[in-house]
Image: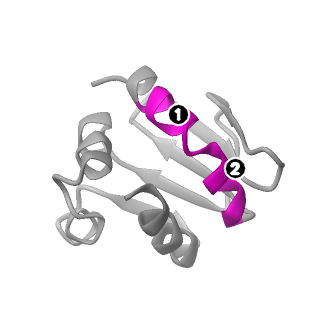
Amino acid sequence: MSVNDIETAFRTKLDAFGELDATVKFDFSGETLFIDGTKQPAVMTNADEDADCTLGITAEDLMSILSGDLDPTMAFMTGRLRVKGSTSIAMKLADLIK
């Protein structure tokens, strides 16, 4: 799994990210994926900018969440998903990407 695979998966969900009306950054330990849901349509880049909610996760674990093989709450509780910033945005995001 790579960040490119995740970008491809998220391209079909960009409209839904606009519903968050927030910025989200996925930190993959060296690579980032930044989604600006304050813009319509939402914009996805590899910029390493400050976000309302930053999620630290491996690309493999995020793909497992997207495929339904890993529950986001369980990933958080076991330390496989770290949240910095707004936890309410992270909870909305979990519902959005299922």
Q: Is residue 31 visible?
A: no
Badge 1 or badge 2: first in the primary sequence: 1
Where 91 falls versus 50 (above or below)? below
Residue 85 percent across, percent down from the top left? 58, 68
Location of mark 2 (residue) = 50
Q: Which residues are magenta?
A: 6-20
Where 8 falls versus 39 (above or below)? above
**x 37%, y 60%: residue:** 82
Where 4 falls versus 25 (above or below)? above
Q: Are marks 1 and 2 in contact (CB under 8 Å)?
A: no
Quadrant assignment, res 17:
bottom right
Q: Residue furthest bottom?
A: 88
Cα distance between the residues tagged 1 and 2: 11 Å
- The answer to which of 65 and 76 lies nearer the viewer is 65
- The answer to which of 84 and 37 lies nearer the viewer is 37
SS class, disc 1:
strand
**x 29%, y 40%: residue:** 63
The crowding category of the residue bearing disc 1, from other C-alpha atoms within 10 Å (few below 14, some 14 to 19, many at least 20), is some
Q: What numbered label is drawn on residue 87?
A: none
Residue 27 percent across, percent down from the top left? 46, 42
Residue 48 percent across, percent down from the top left? 64, 35
The kind of residue tagged 1 is Thr
Quarter the N terminus occupies: top left
**x 70%, y 41%: residue:** 49
- The answer to which of 72 and 49 lies nearer the viewer is 72
Location of mark 1 (residue) = 32
The kind of residue tagged 2 is Asp
Q: Is residue 96 visible?
A: yes
Residue 60 percent across, percent down from the top left? 24, 36
**x 42%, y 32%: residue:** 6
